[in-house]
Amino acid sequence: MVAKSRKTREEQKLIFLEGQSLICDAVAAGAQIQALYFSAIEHLAKLPIDVLQEIPLYKVTLHHMKIWSDVERPPGLLGEI
């Protein structure tokens, strides 16, 4: 995950979305997901299968998800857009 720093995100024009709802809304709006990070396979269940087949998926530990997340209880799914 290269874009934890704000400067890097701004330079590379990246946005990170946390949770199924935000990621599904972004896909529905036409956003191109660059990668998905998840802590459990169940977190991918509601995402469109065609999206999952086209992008890199990375299984990470819940510990790493907590470090990367901006919320107190991370939803277990992080999308790089």
Image (cartoon, rainbow, N blue to C red):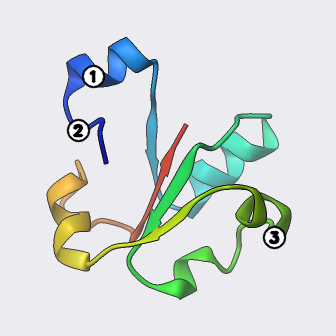
| Corner quadrant of residue 30 | top right
Q: CA distance from mark 3 to mark 1?
A: 30 Å
Numbered mark located on residue 8 in the image: 1
At a point 31% along the width and 48% down the height, the residue shown is: 1
The count of marks equals 3
The residue labelled by disc 2 is 4
Numbered mark located on residue 49 in the image: 3
Left or right: residue 37 compared with residue 4: right
For the residue marked with disc 1, what is the amino acid? Thr
Q: Position of residue 27 (x, y in %)?
A: 74, 45
Left or right: residue 31 compared with residue 79: right
Q: CA distance from mark 3 to mark 2?
A: 27 Å
Q: As rendered, which of 76 and 71 lies closer to the eye?
A: 76
At a point 80% along the width and 65% down the height, the residue shown is: 48
Quarter that holds the C terminus: top right
| Corner quadrant of residue 31 | top right
Q: As rendered, which of 21 and 14 lies closer to the eye?
A: 14
Q: Are marks 2 and 1 in contact (CB under 8 Å)?
A: yes
For the residue marked with disc 2, what is the amino acid? Lys
Of all residues, the one furthest to the top in this rendering is 11
